[in-house]
Each structure stands twice: as structure tokens, then as C-alpha cells.
Image: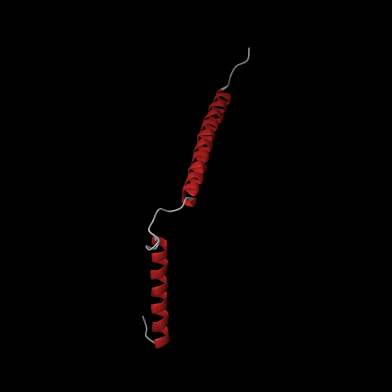
Amino acid sequence: MAFITPDLTAAAIALTALSIVSLVALRGWRDWIQLKREELAAGLAPLAQDPGVPHAGSRIEIADLKERLRKLEAIAAGVDL
């Protein structure tokens, strides 16, 4: 009769736990990838926004450019900021 040693039992439990954790992580990864695909697909749809109103990202870029321009003008004028 073969006896199951405690070491073999611990190894089997550890392997089972690792398998379960790996499967859960894989499922989470696949769901996350699917979420990102849906976000990208939603971003490709045309925006229902007034063409006269600039996008928020554009406004931030314009504000950044104005700030950089102000700093360059101050450097050119010899003013220490």
C-alpha cells in the first residue's frame, strides 16, 4: 500500500492553488483587454459635439503653449521667473 506523504500533499495543494490563481489572473487579463478594446472602439465613433467648441485636450494644449510662450518671452526680455 502506498502512503501519501505530507510533502506530496503540500505540493499538490500548492499546485492547485497556483493553478486557480493563474486562471483567475488570466480571466482578469482577458476582461481588461476586452475593456480596452471596447474603449478604443468607442473612441473611434464620431463625437456629438458642437464644432465651434474646441475639445478639452485642445484647450489644455493651447494653455500649455501660451504658458511656454510667456516663459520664452520673459527669457528673451531678460526677466528671471
Q: Nearer the viewer, residue 19 or 7?
A: 19
Q: Nearer the viewer, residue 1 or 45?
A: 45
Residue furthest to the bottom:
78
From the viewer's perspective, is residue 7 above or below residue 1? below
Residue furthest to the right:
1
Residue furthest to the front:
51
Q: Image quadrant for the C terminus? A: bottom left
From the viewer's perspective, is residue 33 above or below residue 1? below
- What coloring was used for the rendering? secondary structure
Which percent across, then down, holds residue 65?
Answer: 42, 72
Q: Nearer the viewer, residue 11 or 60?
A: 60
The tally of labels here is 0
Which percent across, then down, holds residue 79?
Answer: 37, 85
From the viewer's perspective, is residue 63 above or below residue 47? below
Q: Is residue 11 left or right of residue 53?
A: right
Which percent across, then down, holds residue 73?
Answer: 40, 83
Q: Is residue 11 left or right of residue 73?
A: right
Which percent across, then down, holds residue 70?
Answer: 38, 78
Q: Image quadrant for the N terminus? A: top right
Q: Nearer the viewer, residue 68 or 47?
A: 47
- Residue at the (42%, 80%) spot, across then down: 72
From the viewer's perspective, is residue 61 above or below residue 70? above
- Residue at the (38%, 63%) spot, across then down: 52
